[in-house]
Amino acid sequence: MKQLRRTGILALLAAALFSAACDGFTDPPNGMAKTITVFPMASTTSLVVGDVAAFQARAVDASGDVLSGKFFEWGSTNESVATVSAFGIVTAKSVGSATIVASTDDRMGTIRITVSKAQSAGVASAPSR
């Protein structure tokens, strides 16, 4: 299942690159997304192992108008580092980096995240007598 999901995300990336290469030729029809922007709700892309963070996606049409009511498919290019739910909730799993992908209308937006190791809390020592 993970391999199938990863293959699907890679196919979306390839389609987006092809679409971007052809972007100057035709605009999508009205009501269809031309660009997608992915952004974190808490304005950070640096997470610590164990963190859970919400991300949003915004679709914009060829006229520059934000399209409301769009459903996005979410994915991660490296699920061993971070997973993402169907609602854009990212869970940091291990140290590394991943690209979070949101797609709709054969278009996709991405954002790169970095996951670091949690810093251990210092152990306080008892004062000597």
Image (cartoon, rainbow, N blue to C red):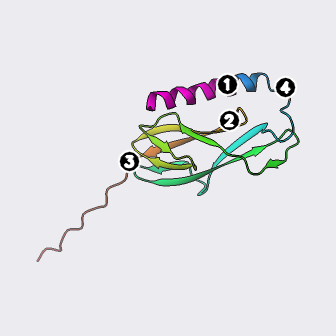
Q: Residue furthest bottom?
A: 129
Q: Above or below — where is 87 with respect to 126?
A: above
Q: Nearer the viewer, mark 4 or mark 3?
A: 4
Judging from the image, what secondary structure is the residue with disc 3 in? loop
Q: Nearer the viewer, mark 3 or mark 2?
A: 2
- Mark 1 = which residue? 15
Residue name at image x 18 percent, y 72 percent: 126
| Amino acid at the residue labelled 3 | Lys
Judging from the image, what secondary structure is the residue with disc 1 in? helix
User: Does the stretch in magenta take in 6?
Assistant: yes
Q: Nearer the viewer, mark 1 or mark 4?
A: 1
Q: Is residue 122 left or right of residue 127?
A: right
- Mark 4 = which residue? 24
User: Do the residues under discs 1 and 2 have CB atoms within 8 angstroms?
Assistant: yes
Residue 117's tag is 3
| Amino acid at the residue labelled 2 | Met
Residue name at image x 28 percent, y 61 percent: 122
Would you call the spot at circle 3 few (<14 residues within 10 Å), some (14-19), or many (20 or more)?
Answer: some
Q: Quadrant location of the C terminus?
A: bottom left
The mark that comes first in sequence, 1 or 2, is: 1
Q: Is residue 21 left or right of residue 75?
A: right
Q: Which residues are magenta?
A: 1-17
Q: Above or below — where is 49 with respect to 33?
A: below
User: Do the residues under discs 1 and 4 have CB atoms within 8 angstroms?
Assistant: no
| Amino acid at the residue labelled 4 | Gly
| Amino acid at the residue labelled 1 | Ala
Residue name at image x 56 percent, y 54 percent: 54
